[in-house]
Image (spheres, helix red, strand yellow):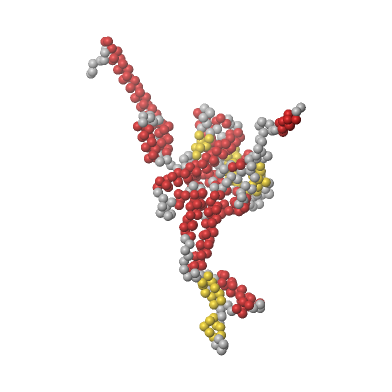
Amino acid sequence: MAKGTVAKAAQDSQQPGQFAEIGVSGFKIAGGIPFEEFLPQLDGERGRRKFREMAENDPTVGSVLFAIGNILRAVKWQAQPSPDAPEAEAKAEAEFAESILDDMSHTWEDFIAEALTMLVYGWSYFEIVLKRRIGPLETDPQKRSKFSDGRIGIRKLAPRSQDSLSKWEMQDDGGIAGLWQIPPLPTPGKPGQIFIPIERALLLRTTSRKNSPEGISVLRTAYRPWFYLTRIQEIEAIGIERELAGLPVVRIPNSLLASEAAADQAIVETYKKIARDVKRNEQGGVVIPSDPFLDADGNPTSVKRVDIELLTSGGTRAIDTDKTVRRYQADIARAVLAEFIMLGSDSKGSFALSKDKTSMFSRACETFLNQIAAAVNRFLLPRIWDYNGLDRATMPSMKPGRVSPIDLGELGTFIESMSRSGATLFPDDNLENYLRDEADLPEKSQEAMDLQAAEREQQAANAAAAAEALAQGKQKQPGGQEPPPV
């Protein structure tokens, strides 16, 4: 056998099968601890503490997260029936899916609020706790339910705090096997670390770059302006205090400063403490000796041996920190597409600009909701369907509603333009109900739809009768001539 043929055969024998995975994602993790972050202060547990400080301590970051949280919690969710199942069965299973989410020990809105912690930390983790739906009179929480159909439902989607993360368990192919957590307090029956497998959990991430289980915090790009903003605010506060209260200066005899005696050193330390701790407030006060220096003849002079004064700068600084602070605040808001919250603070910004910025912000919020919906539809509902032995073809999909209300004026103009161009939009019960829902109007009742359908049938019958009568009148004229006018 030729040398080249032998080498090729050896290479082919080492190749994996056609269905095997060859490469890796490149995600850097060792011992279950990711090390993708290049800033040490944002890595691991330190990073989680820093992002929490940003979220809970900064008014700009807090206002952005508050806006996102309240907007997304108000969005209505609806189960869309499966198109692959008979209409009646698909509708029934869609109602079952909605009943599951309405039958938990917490509200769906509370779940959304907990899910949105992924914005701060980059991820959120929920343990899926199941129950048997026996009835509302059951005392066992594993069986208590609003329903008595005996099906398996969800007792709760229990959040597992990011602060309790110990490490991640990864699969050989780079997949996520689960999460190890350390309870913050001793838990009876659960000593040490607790492993929550991914099969019994729901993982939400802002992004799945490199299949990282931790995603990326939306505050990551806001860290740098937040860091400098915090430092400037601290320096500004110190500067204001020094400008208003002055810098304490204590004058004591040089003999005390040069002395090595323990008593003299104690006096010096006492005055150092006074200089460090003195404050100008309603309780401020200092007690000092009144002894003056003596002249050559031993007579007292007007110069006191110990004196204290507050040294001021004697003028204002030329640095405009307010402008710098506003710039960094705008950078923080811009990092999460929420720059519109700064409009008006400097008496600038048009309505059109505000509308464009809020539209981009709403689109970003819709993306977060769609990520939650994708995880629910791909991992949560299929497990419930399998536990109940249901056909996945009947499984609906959860769909969030609109984040921002539609502009009814623009919608009306669009419908009017469509009608003028010749499009037939009405009568259409589905279209009318959609428009009613967008305008927050009650849905058309079934009685009204039946009455309108009967009226349309009557009008069609009358038109058909009139056309038939006209045709018969034409046939009675000899030679096919038109009948004389009446």
- Identify which residue is drawn at 49% across, 57% down: 325
Looking at this rendering, what residue extends furthest in the right direction? 1
- Identify which residue is drawn at 56% across, 46% down: 118
Looking at this rendering, what residue extends furthest in the top direction? 479
Quarter of the image for the C terminus: give it: top left
Q: Position of residue 171 (x, y in %)?
A: 67, 40
Q: Position of residue 280 (x, y in %)?
A: 51, 70
Quarter of the image for the N terminus: give it: top right
Q: Is residue 278 visible?
A: yes
Residue 485 location, quadrant: top left
Q: Is residue 126 above or below residue 309?
A: above
319 relative position to 18: left or right? left
Q: Tell which of 461 and 248 is nearer to you.
A: 248
Q: Is residue 158 visible?
A: no
Q: Position of residue 10 (x, y in %)?
A: 73, 32
Q: Tell which of 371 and 9 is nearer to you.
A: 9
- Identify which residue is drawn at 63% across, 39% down: 199
- The count of marks equals 0
55 relative position to 446: left or right? right
Looking at this rendering, what residue extends furthest in the bottom direction? 297
Q: Position of residue 21 (x, y in %)?
A: 66, 35
